[in-house]
Image (tube, helix red, strand yellow):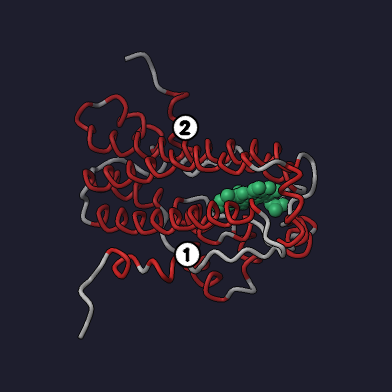
Amino acid sequence: MTQPLSYSSYLKLDELLALQQPKAVPAHLDETQFIIVHQAFELWFKLVLHEIDEIFLALGKNDLRSATRLVRRITQIERLWLEQIHILETMSPTDFLRFRDLLGPSSGLQSWQFREIEFASGLKDPRFLALHEGNPQAHARLKARLAAPSLWDAFLAALAKAGLDIGAGRMGSLKALYQDPAQEPLHALAEALIEYDEYLALWRAHHIHMVSRMIGGKPGTGYKIVEKNLKGDQAMGTQGVDYLGSTLSRKCFPELWEVRTVLEHP
Ligand code: HEM
């Protein structure tokens, strides 16, 4: 007889709760926390990618209202990240050192879901592909996202559908969103997008502060991967916190930030 659906079976809790497998022997108190915080982030990344795909569908139908609502959902998730990242700071830097070596060269730099979010949003840096050559599935997903239209492209397509110039007169069109009340639905979407971008940047800032507090100027665990894959002219900054510092100014929608500079007194 088949069992009726339960909370546990619906959520596949047995499988989910079997996935936290610390490496330290004897066990180290903080490693379970370290794993769960990272896994929780990856689940949120999965949801963000899911929502991004829904946003593409909504914009394909010119449904600006749903697209805006879903972009706001992503921002709400990002707000959580700002809190969540600091859970790690309840571990002391020396406690982290007790199991850090066990991480080998693994690093958040290899989070292909994070990179996929960047690519899907419009922040496309093909140099990152090289980091995922050892994971064909992730590599293929990232390659597909690089080739596919980004959220920024989909936003521009929505502007074009509204009759706005997205070529040479693009800055003028973006200004119009902020100055012409008739463009309210696109203005609401633009504001939702810049907020999404703002919270991603805030996450980077919270992460780098947490990392500085945890490892100071030590090289990150991903240092070896960067050295190996991204050499010479292709090098992406230095190591650890220095590398993270170089990412702080990354923006998914730079033109939405730029338009502020050219807005005039109404
Ligand atoms: C004690 C905890 C952590 C430390 C010490 C740490 C340290 C670092 C360092 C040093 C880097 C730069 C690459 C490298 O050299 O490895 C990095 C990158 C990264 N970390 Fe963390 N991290 C921690 C926790 C997290 C968590 C919880 C996440 C959430 C998924 C995360 C996500 C990332 C991502 C996505 C990158 C790549 C950023 C980019 O390329 O823009 N990290 N981390």
Residue furthest front as drawn: 26
From this view, report whether residue 127 is shown above or below residue 264.
Answer: below
Left or right, 111 with reference to 79: right
Element on which disc 2 rests: helix
- Name the spot of residue 201 as percent of width and height, x first: 53, 38
Distance (Cα) linking label 2 and label 1: 24 Å
Q: Residue at x 79, y 49 (%)?
A: 219
Instruction: Report helix, strand or loop for mark 1.
Output: helix
From the viewer's perspective, is 6 left or right of 105? Answer: left
The answer to whether residue 58 is seen in the rendering is yes
Out of 262 and 60, give the one closest to the viewer.
60
Q: Residues within 10 Å of mark 2 (few under 14, many from 20)?
A: few
Judging by the rendered image, the residue that carries numbered circle 1 is 147
Give the label on residue 102, or none: none
Q: Is mark 2 within 8 Å of ligand 1?
A: no
Of residues 160 and 7, which is closer to you in this image? 7
Residue assigned mark 2:
257
Q: Earlier in the sequence, mark 2 or mark 1?
A: 1
Amino acid type assigned to the residue bearing label 2 in the image: Trp
What is the quadrant of residue 112 in the picture?
bottom right
Q: Position of residue 234 (x, y in %)?
A: 73, 57
Relative placement, left or right, of 164 versus 1 is: right
Q: Residue at x 62, y 39 (%)?
A: 89
Assign the N terminus to one quadrant of the image. Answer: bottom left
